[in-house]
Image (cartoon, rainbow, N blue to C red):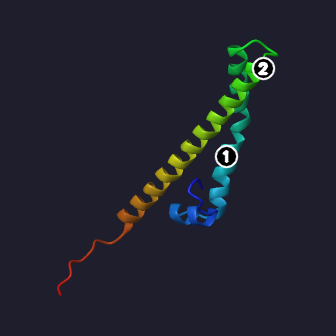
Amino acid sequence: MAKGKTQREISSALGVSVMTYHRWKKMLKSHQPTMNRGLQETAGRLHSPGDANSEEAIKRLELENAQLRRLVTDALLEKLKYEEELRAHRGAPPRRPDNG
């Protein structure tokens, strides 16, 4: 999605249905609140409560977390695509040489 592809194009490239793609995306989102809570706790330890810098630190960490989450998601989708291609390649009949 980072490259502007539609969900249908991504699903097709991965060899899965759009519904499977949505299920994966939902599973990733279900882990997000836990990650954000951890970021806030970490930022709270960096600065004293009520400090303006703590809010900036939280925002920086949340931005970094979102970027890292996107990278991991893209890597996971790419890995799944390669696994699917490998399965398709292994299941394909051997190529015959051209005699012409």
Q: Secondary structure at mark 1?
A: helix
Quarter assignment of residue 60: top right
Instruction: Tell me which residue sits at (28%, 71%) in the image.
Output: 94
- The C terminus: image quadrant: bottom left
Q: In screen coordinates, is 51 left or right of 75?
A: right
Residue 96 is situated, as x and y percent measured from the top left of the image, at 24, 77
Q: In screen coordinates, is 47 left or right of 73?
A: right
Residue 66 is situated, as x and y percent measured from the top left of the image, at 64, 39
| CA neighbours of label 1 inside 10 A, class few (<14), some (14 to 19), many (20+) | few
Q: In screen coordinates, is 91 left or right of 21?
A: left
Q: Could you tell me how far apart the alpha carbons at marks 2 and 1 are, in whole angstroms? A: 34 Å
| CA neighbours of label 2 inside 10 A, class few (<14), some (14 to 19), many (20+) | few
Is 95 rendered above or below residue 45? below
In this figure, which residue is indicated by the disc labeled 1? 27
Is 74 rendered above or below residue 21? above
In this figure, which residue is indicated by the disc labeled 2? 52
Instruction: Tell me which residue sits at (62%, 63%) in the image.
Output: 6
Work out which residue is located at the far bottom of the displayed protein and give it.
100
Is 92 rendered above or below residue 83? below
Work out which residue is located at the far right of the displayed protein and give it.
50
The three-letter amino acid code for the residue at tag 2 is Ala
| Depth check, front residue: 46 or 53 | 53
Quarter assignment of residue 90: bottom left
